[in-house]
Image (cartoon, helix red, strand yellow):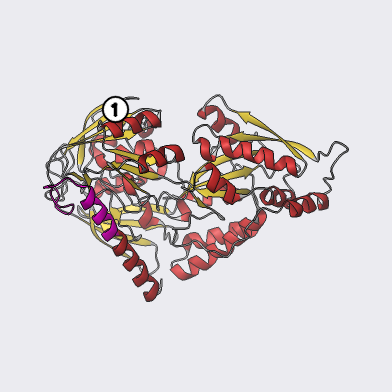
């Protein structure tokens, strides 16, 4: 990033911070402490609409587990709101000249919740355990071993340069687990201490976990960042009904609702003077909504057919009418806040004549009844604005170009994931996260080597030799500008090939009581440690 752009970005961030502070001050009651004076104590109640199976983010991806896991476990690094890595358990780090080794110097004062010190042995155990058990195989795929020359030095050895490694060491992706607890030989994915008696070194320790109901965390008094956390407790209350959670926030029963995206609920919160709505804090998540196309099925194996489907849809209508303007349009595989995003894409603005022309060229002429062919559109359960409603809109639009689409509803979320994982679909709505670095969250969707019967892999059966080459090169390229160029070419090719019709960036918001100070706005937002959050 050039100095001028960086200065502009920092100035904008400063201005936004000033506006936010002013808004907070105006909302605070007379005599309240200034927003920048943290107070000790209090219980933060956080609403959560997905229920975690357990609390160990080292073997499970997704918001449900990561929300409490990032409080229980500390990671080696954390990130600010400008994509800059910050010290956490690691005080410093240094790459080798060839980019195949990362040396981390650990804090000497960090202890686990049971009082045992955090050492390089715990780091080595955790990195290799995550490599073996986490669903994101590319995250530590290049890790060969972790050397421990002394108790406070860890050297991550790689088979090839891996520039995504620093992001992979973030709180929601790489919790450091105590080897003396989790290295007892039991299957880590099913380890009983993932749910009960959880031991980490994060700002909060586990008091109680009632599956499907709540997670209660208490302040860890021996947390290595002195004076923090400010809160005494965090309680995650679980309820699948987001509207019920919002009512609880309005009543004051809870103070924070992360990952809210329904336009009706966002509009309702925006009208409440006692609530604050933050869109910041989801840049690392990078959630995109799209229509995925099964390119292995006829007639969708013809790129002209896929392009025709894209030209039939009015993205502006989807944004304005279906998300009430809360979402931002998405034209490619990288969220716009990613340092590797480009604007040089093949963009499909609604053009029904162009769509019909392409279908004619593909040999799919209208029949006597005006129909070209039939297809089925599946939609992911939940998130109606960018799923069911999009599917219904797509059906109406495709009829205009002679394509008859039937909507198929799955009984529940697991049923939908099984269908899509088995590649048993024509087209489906979906929402997938970038997860910080493209190696972690983007490559999985486009690599031909990742066409597997697993959800959120390359279930589109998309194959492009040049894309495979570009992603392989970008995964090991140490020079940031060269990486950007490789990803720019990748994005151009993918948007021309249309294995996916990109629709929107999911409008995740954190809804807060105006009594919450220092809300989480780093690139990981509510998936970051909440050690600086306080109640006014």
Residue 7: name its quadrant.
bottom left
Q: Quadrant of the N terminus?
A: bottom left
| Residue 178 image position (x, y, % from top left) | 24, 40
Quarter-wise, where is residue 4 in the image? bottom left
In this rendering, the count of numbered labels is 1
Instruction: Return the residue nearer the eye: 203 or 471.
Output: 203
**Between residues 452 and 526, which one lies in front from this camera angle?**
526
Asked if the stretch drawn in magenta spans residue 36, the answer is yes
Circle 1 — which element?
strand
Residue 421 horizontal/vertical position (percent): 58, 35
Q: Residue drawn 60% across and 44% down?
A: 291
The residue sitting at 28% across, 45% down in the picture is: 176
Query: What residue is at 20 percent from the left and 43 percent from the top?
Result: 203
Image height of 422 relative to 516, above or below: above
In this view of the protein, can residue 438 be seen by the observer? yes
Give the percent coordinates (x, y) of residue 99: 39, 65
User: In this figure, which residue is indicated by the disc labeled 1?
Assistant: 214
Magenta stretch: includes residue 141: no
Q: Is residue 178 visible?
A: no
Q: Is residue 7 left or right of residue 89?
A: right
The image shows residue 23, relative to residue 98, as above or below, that is above
Quadrant location of the C terminus in the rendered image: top left
Above or below, comparing residue 290 to residue 19 in the picture: above
Horizontal side of 397 relative to 527 (left or right) equals right
Q: Which residues are magenta?
A: 17-38
Alpha-carbon neighbours of circle 1 within 10 Å: few (<14), some, or many (≥20)? some
Side (left or right) of 386 relative to 314: left
Q: Position of residue 335 (x, y in %)?
A: 48, 54
């Amino acid at each position: 990033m050039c100095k001028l752009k960086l200065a502009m970005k920092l100035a904008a961030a400063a201005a936004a911070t000033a506006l936010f502070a002013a808004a907070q001050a105006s909302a605070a009651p007379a005599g309240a402490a200034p927003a920048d004076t943290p107070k000790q104590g209090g219980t933060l109640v956080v609403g959560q609409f997905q229920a975690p199976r357990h609390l160990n983010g080292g073997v499970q991806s997704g918001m449900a587990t990561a929300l409490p896991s990032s409080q229980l476990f500390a990671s080696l690094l954390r990130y600010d709101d400008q994509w800059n890595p910050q010290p956490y358990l690691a005080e410093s780090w240094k790459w080798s000249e060839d980019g195949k080794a990362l040396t981390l110097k650990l804090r000497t004062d960090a202890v686990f919740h049971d009082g045992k010190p955090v050492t390089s042995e715990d780091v080595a155990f955790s990195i290799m355990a995550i490599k073996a058990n986490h669903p994101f195989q590319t995250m530590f795929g290049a890790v060969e071993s972790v050397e421990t020359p002394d108790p406070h030095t860890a050297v991550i050895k790689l088979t090839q340069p891996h520039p995504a490694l620093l992001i992979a060491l973030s709180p929601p992706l790489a919790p450091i687990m105590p080897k003396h607890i989790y290295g007892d030989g039991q299957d880590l994915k099913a380890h009983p201490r993932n749910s009960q008696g959880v031991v980490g070194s994060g700002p909060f320790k586990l008091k109680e976990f009632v599956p499907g109901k709540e997670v209660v965390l208490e302040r860890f008094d021996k947390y290595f960042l002195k004076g923090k956390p400010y809160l005494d407790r965090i309680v995650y209350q679980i309820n699948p009904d987001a509207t019920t959670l919002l009512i609880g926030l309005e009543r004051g029963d809870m103070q924070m609702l992360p990952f809210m995206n329904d336009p009706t609920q966002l509009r309702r919160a925006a009208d409440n003077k006692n609530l604050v709505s933050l869109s910041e804090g989801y840049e690392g998540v990078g959630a995109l909504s799209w229509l995925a196309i099964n390119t292995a099925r006829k007639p969708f194996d013809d790129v002209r057919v896929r392009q025709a489907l894209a030209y039939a849809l009015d993205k502006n209508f989807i944004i304005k009418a279906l998300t009430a303007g809360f979402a931002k349009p998405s034209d490619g595989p990288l969220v716009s806040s990613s340092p590797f995003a480009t604007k040089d894409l093949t963009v499909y603005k609604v053009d029904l004549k162009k769509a019909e022309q392409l279908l004619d060229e593909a040999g799919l002429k209208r029949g006597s009844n005006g129909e070209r062919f039939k297809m089925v559109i599946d939609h992911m359960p939940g998130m109606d604005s960018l799923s069911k409603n999009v599917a219904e809109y797509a059906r109406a639009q495709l009829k205009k170009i002679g394509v008859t689409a039937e909507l198929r509803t799955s009984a529940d979320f697991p049923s939908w994931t099984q269908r899509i994982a088995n590649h048993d679909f024509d087209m489906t709505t979906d929402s997938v996260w970038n997860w910080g670095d493209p190696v972690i969250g983007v490559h999985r969707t486009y690599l031909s080597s990742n066409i597997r019967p697993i959800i959120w892999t390359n279930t589109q059966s998309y194959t492009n030799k040049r894309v495979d080459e570009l992603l392989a090169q970008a995964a090991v390229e140490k020079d940031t500008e060269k990486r950007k160029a490789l990803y720019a070419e990748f994005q151009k090719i993918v948007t021309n090939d249309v294995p996916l019709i990109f629709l929107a960036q999911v409008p995740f918001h954190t809804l807060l009581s105006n009594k919450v100070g220092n809300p989480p706005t780093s690139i990981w937002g509510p998936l970051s440690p909440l050690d600086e959050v306080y109640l006014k």
